[in-house]
Image (cartoon, rainbow, N blue to C red):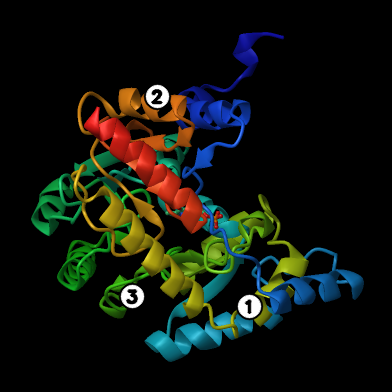
Amino acid sequence: MSDAWIADRTRAFDSSGIRKVFDLAAKLTDPINLSIGQPDFGVPLEVQNAAIEAIRGGKNGYALTQGMPVLRDKLQAQVDAAFNHPDRRVIVTSGTSGGLVLAMWSLVNPGDEVIVFDPFFVMYESLVKLIGGKCVLIDTYPDFQIDVERVAAAITPRTKLILLNSPANPTGVVASPAVVRQLAELAAERNVVLLSDEIYREFCYDEPFLTPASFNPDTLVIDGFSKSHAITGWRLGFAHGPRAIIDAMIKLQQYTFVCAPQPAQWAGAVAMDIDMSGHAADYRRKRDLLVAGLADDFELVTPGGAFYAFPKAPRGTATEFVARAIERGLLIIPGNVFSRRDTHFRISYAADDAVIRRGIDVLQKLARE
Ligand code: PMP
């Protein structure tokens, strides 16, 4: 096979950083795995049963491209009740990732600039590159709060979109209410799309979740059931935003993903009625356990949401520190996977308390060596 067969766009980015950790994980026996970005609680029984019933009931064919009414109408009613925006429409997507892909493809022309906050969810930079856009990174170290004045200064005539993710992966930081509001207003003033990735909406520990869509009716929201209901493998997400954007996304979905899996959509409609706040409360407690365990030895911004913490490596690069942690059986992710900097590392506390405690123990010992 000729190397030239592989399209150039695949060379614009690589995925080696995170893959290395997963490759190492496969070799370890009984690793202390705090690297995984998915909940450790079970799928609610009602949701499991709804998926099984859908499959047994013959709901296995293609779904409507925009989403099955059983789920889409329910989401639309929820969105209407929350925002009362006359132009806001819903699409059911193949995971939140599917929603992100469709949104980017629908909005970003080659050469357009996309403002992304560093550190960022790994997919953002690659996706922007894949469609020929240009990532304009805004550094948010050391507190990971967005400086809205810096965003205003970064906007050019080529800026198409600002990508907000709060609560954030990998930092767990929640944007302050003032930042959410100012960013929403700035996007409206400067005629730039604000894309809000709200996949960790259910995991907000210190204050209620706040969406920029409350302040800017043209905000495009990307959301999904992966994290809220522990169904990352079912590929069920949704997006809501101005009708013209959603229509473009539906058109692209038709020729790419076709639809989100049908059985998952029937189960998703059931999932919407289930109170998951007990799990969020449990994760808040896990957050507190981890933060208390690291407080004496690490520089750490207390994460207000999601299920990640992003402490600073005590010395050297994060890659070096993570390599030493992995030698002791602890799997964590070096910050350079999510960032231009290689100073911090991501810990996921979506794990059993005993595993979190073992992880804290290794980290404390490493820091004190
Ligand atoms: N956005 C963020 C910020 C995420 O962390 C993730 C998953 N790690 C996704 C989107 C994608 O989620 P999904 O499984 O719904 O595609």
* Residue 159 seen in this snapshot: yes
Mark in the foreground, 2 or 3: 2
Query: Where in the figure is residue 228, as x and y percent of width and height?
Result: 52, 68
Give whichever of discs 1 and 2 has the lower sequence position. Answer: 1
Q: Residue at x 45, y 35 (%)?
A: 330
Q: Which mark is residue 209?
A: 3
Q: How many marks?
A: 3
* Mark drawn on residue 133: none
The label shown at residue 323 is 2
In the image, 261 versus 132, the foreground residue is 261
**Residue 343, relative to residue 181: is it above or below?**
above
Residue 111, visible in the rendered structure: no
Q: Quadrant of the C terminus?
A: top left
- Residue 273 point in image, percent of width and height: 60, 85
Q: Mark 1 — residue?
A: 271
What's the residue at 45%, 41% (across, down)?
A: 127
Residue ID at (44%, 37%): 126
Identify which amino acid the numbered label 2 is placed on: Ala
Q: Position of residue 338 (x, y in %)?
A: 35, 38
Label located before the other in sequence (2 or 3): 3
* SS for dot 3: loop
Give 55 or 131, whichever is nearer the viewer.
55
The residue lying at 42 percent from left, 41 percent from top is 122
